[in-house]
Image (tube, rainbow, N blue to C red):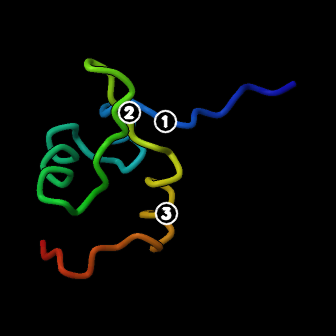
């Protein structure tokens, strides 16, 4: 049996998946260009891998966002 693929990842991992610094990733989340994390508990939040993949595939682009 192969290694399990993560369903959700930390901010640092999510940023790395998009080849960004965590601070850049955080800024894009705060302005709404990237999805917010899922709140697992009061202290734990994770980004869904499927949401990040959708962005990379062009299925979740915010056309109102300007760089």
Label 3 packing within 10 angstroms: few (<14), some (14-19), many (20+): few
- In the displayed structure, 16 sits above or below 50; it is above
- Residue sticking out furthest to the top: 43
SS for dot 2: strand
Q: Which residue is mark 1?
A: 8
Mark 2 or 3, which is nearer the eye?
A: 2
67 and 60: which is toward the camera: 60
Which label number is shown at residue 54?
3
Q: Which quarter of the figure is the C terminus placed in?
A: bottom left
Label 1 packing within 10 angstroms: few (<14), some (14-19), many (20+): some
- Residue sticking out furthest to the front: 42
- In the displayed structure, 32 sits above or below 7; it is below
SS for dot 3: helix
**Do the CB atoms of the residues marked 1 and 3 lie less than 8 Å apart?**
no
How far apart are the two marked residues, 2 and 3, measured between alpha carbons? 16 Å
SS for dot 1: strand
**Image-based side of 6 in relation to 40, left or right:** right
Sequence-earlier tag: 1 or 3: 1
């Amino acid at each position: 049996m192969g290694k399990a693929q993560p369903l959700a990842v930390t901010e640092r991992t999510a940023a790395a998946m998009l080849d960004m610094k965590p601070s850049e990733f955080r800024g894009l989340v705060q302005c709404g260009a990237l999805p917010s994390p899922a709140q697992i508990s009061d202290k734990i939040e994770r980004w869904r891998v499927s949401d990040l993949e959708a962005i990379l595939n062009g299925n979740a682009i915010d056309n109102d966002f300007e760089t």
